[in-house]
Structure formats: C-alpha cells, structure tokens
Image (cartoon, rainbow, N blue to C red):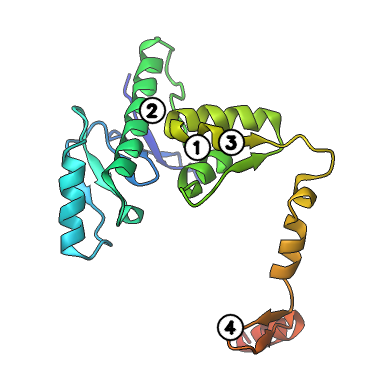
Amino acid sequence: EVLVQISKEPIGTKGARVASNMSLRGRYVVYPPTVDHVGISKRIGSEKERSRLREAIDTMKPPQGGLIVRTVAEGLTKKQLKADVGYLVRLWGEVVKKREIGQRAPVCLYSEVDLVLKTARDLFTDDIEKIVIDSREEYFRLKKFIEMFMPERIDAIELYEGEEPIFDAYGIEDEIQRALAREVPLPSGGHLIIDQAEALTAIDVNTG
C-alpha cells in the first residue's frame, strides 16, 4: 500500500494525477509532512520581510516535514503563524491515525475542506467579529473545525435561530441590492451609471 495525494482530478478518460509527496494547505503556510524543506513565497519581494519570516518559521518547524510560507503571511506575527502550523500538524496526526486503524486501501484519509470551512480558514481574521450560521448541522461542524484551527475564537461562532430568514434579519438582501445598483457613487461626488444592455452590446460588437 502506498500513501498518495491527488493533485489533479480525473478528466474524461484520464485518471487522477497523484503525488507521493503530501502537502496540507493552511491559511498562511503549507505543511509538507514528507519533505524536509523550509521555503518562503517568491511573491514576498522584500528581502527584509523574507528573512524575518524565515527566522520565525525556523523556530516552529515540526520535527517531521517542512514548512512553506504563503504570500498572505506577509506582515504576520509569530503567534499567527504558530497557530496555523499547529493546526496543520494536528491535522496530519489525524491522517496518520486513520491510516493506522488498518482500513483496506483504497480509502480516503483526508480531503480538502469545503466552501464553509475554507471560508472560515481563509477569511475569519481578527477583523471579523463573529460568524453567524443558520444551519444547526453546519454550525456544529464549523465549531469543531474552529476548535481545532483557532480555539481562541470558538465563542465567535453563533447559531442563528430567528424566525425570519437570516439575510433579512441582518439586512444582507438590502446590501446586495445596493451593491448591484446601476448608479455607483464616487468619492469625488460624481457617479457612474452601469447599463447592462449597452455593455452586452459593446461586447458583441468587439468580439465580431
């Protein structure tokens, strides 16, 4: 039995592309548990910042594997990076534990998080006060994820149990309508008017 990671989904008659070197993606870092390598995203251009991040990540590198710092980690503190690394190490531990149970291959040991969990992982920053969710099932699933990923923010997950739809209760529908308005105000005091019909006509002309 060989442990592999699917790097590309199957298309048509082509099977999935697999890799023997695993990698788990977090919000700020990527953890390759089978490769002893520390790297910094090339998109972080400042040499000073690259050196700072490398120094920080060297202090929290797990005994097994390496770490690759993503571009979004630029300007982060050690505490923020350490929380992400800790989550990925725990996640890999769960993968190993599942494999040791002895389920017969082929079996899925881990899959990338779905839209709900991915949104929380990538967008639930300190600027976000709380996440309100109206599905009891998704609420408990999200709480379990946050408890592992960022336990200090577990109390910021709230279950909405009101009678009216959650979008109406928080005025989201009105926000969407304003965002889709034809007239867009500008800081200068002027405004833009977007006419969908004219825009479509212009596209048709330009594309022949």
Q: Between disc 3 and disc 4, whose residue precedes?
A: 3
In space, the residues marked 3 and 1 are separated at their CA atoms by 18 Å
Q: Amino acid at mark 3?
A: Ile
Q: CA distance from mark 3 to mark 2?
A: 21 Å
Nearer the observer, 85 or 204: 85
Q: In the image, what residue occupies the spot 49% across and 52% down?
A: 127
**Location of residue 16 in the rendering, given as x and y in whole percent from the top left corner:** 44, 39
In the image, residue 95 above or below residue 50: above
The amino acid sitting under disc 4 is Pro
The circle on residue 113 is: 1
Q: Which circle marks residue 187 in the picture?
A: 4
| Sequence order check, earlier mark of 2 and 4 | 2
- Nearest to the eye among marks 4 and 1: give it: 4
Identify the residue under disc 3: 157
Q: Measured from the top left, where is residue 145 in percent x and y?
A: 50, 31
Q: Closer to the camera, 95 or 180?
A: 180
